[in-house]
Image (cartoon, grey):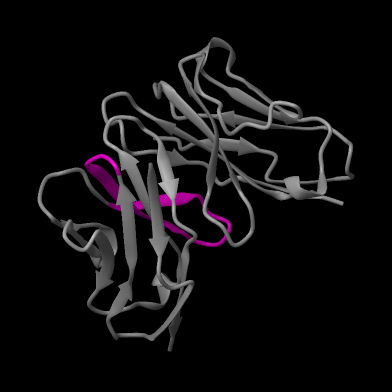
Amino acid sequence: EAGVAQSPRYKIIEKRQSVAFWCNPISGHATLYWYQQILGQGPKLLIQFQNNGVVDDSQLPKDRFSAERLKGVDSTLKIQPAKLEDSAVYLCASMPLATPYEQYFGPGTRLTVT
Amino acid sequence: AQSVTQLDSHVSVSEGTPVLLRCNYSSSYSPSLFWYVQHPNKGLQLLLKYTSAATLVKGINGFEAEFKKSETSFHLTKPSAHMSDAAEYFCVVSRFGTGKLIFGQGTTLQVKP
């Protein structure tokens, strides 16, 4: 079974630039998550989708972050404009409806904002 | 509200000796509890889970954890550390069925030869 795929793996941008991350969840997993993991901290949930609908985006900084999951499969997370404090690893995870507690994580995208 | 406190940011053990990573939780609901492991440049992997069944939970790679409601703890143990256990470990709490995970700050496990 293929795992959660993310790209790019690494990205370096200057502040005020924009950036986008892509996630392909495990086939058949209805729920998809984006997390932000700042160095030295645990992952923090940014947004949760079920199929192509948003379940929870209460911790997403909506003035600069946006996410979509068209057709209920792949998802993109965008930051525009980026700030220095956005430097982090962005993790995507997916979860099947049958086991609503076990999330499968991708390898993450490490973003450095200079 | 739910939260998790990992009591040690860094734990160092010698290969072959026992491992203890400590976690306390706070939850307004009956919690589901998890331990995840993160190896460098790899995704988070589920080690074990507690979802209101047996209080002693066995996971992969010889790890286990015991849910103690009276102490609000969910400590992770392993009888004998292996070099490959060196990684970052996260204790996680969730309200059962919500699919929302709240992570602790993490504990770095170092295993010395």
Q: Residue B36: which quarter of the image?
A: bottom left
Q: Which residues are magenta?
A: B28-48
The quarter of the picture where the N terminus of chain B appears is top left
Compared to residue A34, the image places residue A84 above or below, namely below
Q: Residue furthest top?
A: A71
Q: Nearer the viewer, residue B27 or B9?
A: B27
Q: Nearer the viewer, residue B92 or A12?
A: B92
Q: Nearer the viewer, residue B78 or A27?
A: B78
Q: Position of residue A89 (x, y in %)?
A: 64, 48
Q: Position of residue B84 (x, y in %)?
A: 41, 71
Compared to residue A5, the image places residue B80 above or below, namely below
Horizontally, residue B10 falls left or right of residue A113, namely left
Horizontally, residue A11 falls left or right of residue B19, namely right
Q: Nearer the viewer, residue A50 or B45?
A: A50
Q: Residue at x 22, y 41 (%)?
A: B30
Horizontally, residue B95 falls left or right of residue B54, namely right
